[in-house]
Image: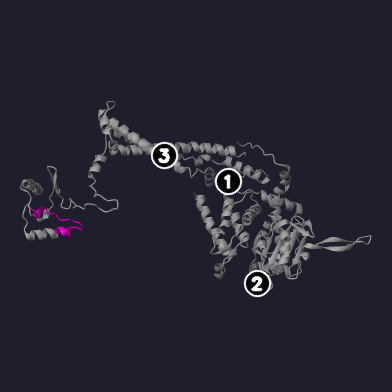
């Protein structure tokens, strides 16, 4: 139909713009992700892979810093590729509706254009007039109005900003003093949870008193829990009064707290200096 | 890009060109002429014209004295069409409508049967108080309405084109009436409900008709032109999304078992789209818009649904239900449009 070449021309024009915008958005997201990776030393994630750390130390092609940068760039590329693929798969369902877009932006074409497109195989005296009408209106519209120029410019500026920041970070070697490995070290040990969701081997919260509660000596674990606020110091004999106080304080502190039997038992003599050392350290 | 490669239209299309080009003028003159005779009732006049353009028939439900007969006889005069009126009564027989074979003497004195046409052989037929006729007589109208032909004693007679029936029924007096069967109701393209005129309109009616003045109407078009207008109406294009919108509305009437016992048939979908085309054509538009469908939903559907017992018990009318369906579908359509 004679209005179709105009539509094809407009569609091609807009496709180029939207293609460029899409490319810029991908580039912008890549640079943003890459920048974050550099700032937070995300190359350490790669070292969780078996053999990677050894490889990084043994390879002689580039220095370690550059090697880490390449690792992060590859990571960012993989992530963006994955995201773009997911987006493409989902986008299949919501096709870019060029006709609706034209009708929305040019009210003169409302319903007329889609009717002409749906009836383009239907030649009669009425559709003939409609086709002429649509053609005349189509050639008069300013399709440039629909080109996402501002979006392209904005995305490009953001892309430049991120790229500049990346360049600065790499040349200056700047990054935050945070790394994935540090973060994993800071995460407290979680209790073992069974398949049914119950907590197995319930243990005392070792940070309850702000001190280490277990000492490992020659491969043996010795429980050493005591409330330092009691100021009792070490004794291997606890009188009945203190014992009840200890019990009371233990029981009332928190539900689930299990008070240690360490002080009601006679410990072997060889542990004595070690325990003394612990409390001395604690009181200093 | 500005040069256009002209499409070669077929001769049948080119024959329609003169009528097509002056269609808007024709409609303007028709409305003006009817307006000279009828005060108000613009919606009824428009819907009658829509039905005529779609080759359909109309059922008018109104109290007496609202100008139904005057309207239809005026239209027949304007279009130079043969008009007849059938006053339906319980003792009216099918032959009274279709006609019958009568014995006739020829010049030689021998007798033979000759078919005498009934009032159905007209272009515009007013079947007044159709629900007073017996079911047998009502069903005699069925073939005429649907097939545009009548069969008498194994002989089929084609009715003249255009053929249009305007049937009326009184909504108040139901005693001694035979409610139209669903199959027959479905054959009416539109059901129009007439309201009393406004005070000002009534004042004008009194001014015109309570005196010696008798409005004369001018013949504006002939039958052939009107037949061409009917052909053009079917050529008005409609987009696929609007077709789906119309179908969704009709289809929804089948999915409300708590309110509607029997929904509208696919014939209703066809009727809705056709009427929307005619509505667009009367507005001098060469394509159908959503508003055309919205405008025709009530008259097309109101007689095609059967209310459930619960709905009837709660005094819910078919108009209210259809209005609700329309609102829902409109909202859905708008949401879809916004993307």
Q: Which quadrant of the figure has residue A155? A: top left
Q: Which residue sits at x=52%, y=47%? A: A104
| Dot 3: element | helix
Kindly indicate whether the residue at mark 1 contacts the one at mark 3 (C-beta within 8 angstroms). Answer: no
Residue found at the far right of this picture: B108
**Magenta segment includes A258:** yes
Q: What is the chain identity of the residue bearing mark 2?
A: B
Vertical comparison of B170 with A15: above or below: below
Q: Residue at left 35%, top 36%?
A: A76
Q: Is residue B143 above or below residue A178?
A: below
In what element is the residue under mark 2?
A: loop
Q: Which residue is mark 2?
A: B172
Viewer-closest of A99 and A172: A99
Relative image position of residue B207 (x, y in whole percent): 71, 68
Q: Are marks 2 and 1 on the same chain?
A: no
Q: Are marks 3 and 1 on the same chain?
A: yes
* Region rendered in magenta: A249-265
Q: Which residue is mark 1?
A: A114
Q: CA distance from mark 2 to mark 1?
A: 46 Å
């Amino acid at each position: 139909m004679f209005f179709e070449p105009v539509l094809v021309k407009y569609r091609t024009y807009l496709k180029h713009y939207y293609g460029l915008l899409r490319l810029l958005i991908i580039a912008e997201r890549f640079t943003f992700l890459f920048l974050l990776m550099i700032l937070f030393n995300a190359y350490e994630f790669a070292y969780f892979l078996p053999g990677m750390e050894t490889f990084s130390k043994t390879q002689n092609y580039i220095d370690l810093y550059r090697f880490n940068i390449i690792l992060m760039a590859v990571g960012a590329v993989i992530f963006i590729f994955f995201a773009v693929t997911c987006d493409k798969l989902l986008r299949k369902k919501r096709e870019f509706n060029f006709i609706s877009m034209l009708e929305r932006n040019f009210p003169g074409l409302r319903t007329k254009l889609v009717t002409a497109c749906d009836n383009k195989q239907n030649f009669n005296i009425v559709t003939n007039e409609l086709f002429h009408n649509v053609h005349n209106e189509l050639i008069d519209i300013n399709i440039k109005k629909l080109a996402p120029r501002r979006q392209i410019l904005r995305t490009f500026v953001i892309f430049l900003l991120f790229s500049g920041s990346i360049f600065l970070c790499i040349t200056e070697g700047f990054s935050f003093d945070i790394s994935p490995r540090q973060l994993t070290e800071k995460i407290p040990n979680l209790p073992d949870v069974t398949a049914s969701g119950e907590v197995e081997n319930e243990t005392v919260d070792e940070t309850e008193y702000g001190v280490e509660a277990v000492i490992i000596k020659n491969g043996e674990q010795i429980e050493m829990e005591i409330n330092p606020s009691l100021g009792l110091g070490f004794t291997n004999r606890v009188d009945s009064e203190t014992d009840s106080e200890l019990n009371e304080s233990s029981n009332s502190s928190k539900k689930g707290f299990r008070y240690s039997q360490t002080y009601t038992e006679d410990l072997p003599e060889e542990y004595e200096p070690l325990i003394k050392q612990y409390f001395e350290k604690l009181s200093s | 890009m500005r040069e256009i490669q002209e499409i070669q239209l077929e001769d049948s299309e080119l024959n329609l060109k003169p009528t097509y080009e002056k269609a808007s003028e024709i409609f303007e003159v028709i409305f003006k002429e009817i307006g000279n005779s009828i005060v108000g009732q613009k919606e009824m006049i428009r819907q009658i014209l829509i039905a005529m353009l779609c080759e359909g028939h109309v059922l008018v439900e109104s109290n007496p004295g609202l100008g139904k007969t005057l309207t239809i006889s005026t239209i027949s005069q304007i279009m130079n069409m043969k008009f007849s009126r059938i006053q339906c009564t319980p003792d009216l027989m099918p032959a009274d409508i279709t006609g019958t074979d009568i014995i006739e003497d020829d010049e030689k004195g021998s007798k033979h049967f000759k078919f005498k046409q009934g009032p159905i052989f007209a272009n515009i037929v007013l079947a007044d108080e159709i629900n007073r006729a017996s079911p047998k007589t009502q069903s005699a109208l069925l073939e005429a309405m649907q097939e545009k032909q009548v069969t008498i004693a194994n002989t089929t007679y084609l009715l003249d084109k255009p053929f249009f029936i305007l049937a009326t029924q009184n909504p108040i007096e139901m005693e001694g009436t035979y409610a139209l069967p669903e199959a027959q109701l479905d054959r009416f393209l539109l059901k129009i409900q007439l309201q009393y005129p406004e005070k000002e309109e009534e004042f004008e009616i009194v001014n015109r008709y309570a005196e010696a003045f008798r409005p004369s109407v001018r013949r504006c078009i002939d039958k052939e032109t009107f037949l061409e207008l009917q052909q053009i109406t079917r050529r008005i294009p409609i987009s696929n999304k609007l077709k789906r919108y119309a179908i969704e509305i009709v289809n929804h009437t089948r999915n409300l078992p708590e309110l509607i016992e029997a929904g509208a048939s696919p014939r209703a979908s066809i009727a809705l789209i056709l009427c929307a085309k005619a509505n667009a054509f009367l507005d001098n538009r060469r394509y159908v818009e959503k508003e055309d469908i919205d405008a025709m939903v009530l008259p097309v559907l109101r007689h095609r649904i059967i209310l459930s017992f619960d709905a009837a018990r709660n005094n819910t009318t078919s108009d209210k239900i259809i209005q609700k369906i329309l609102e829902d579908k409109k909202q859905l359509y708008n949401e879809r449009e916004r993307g």
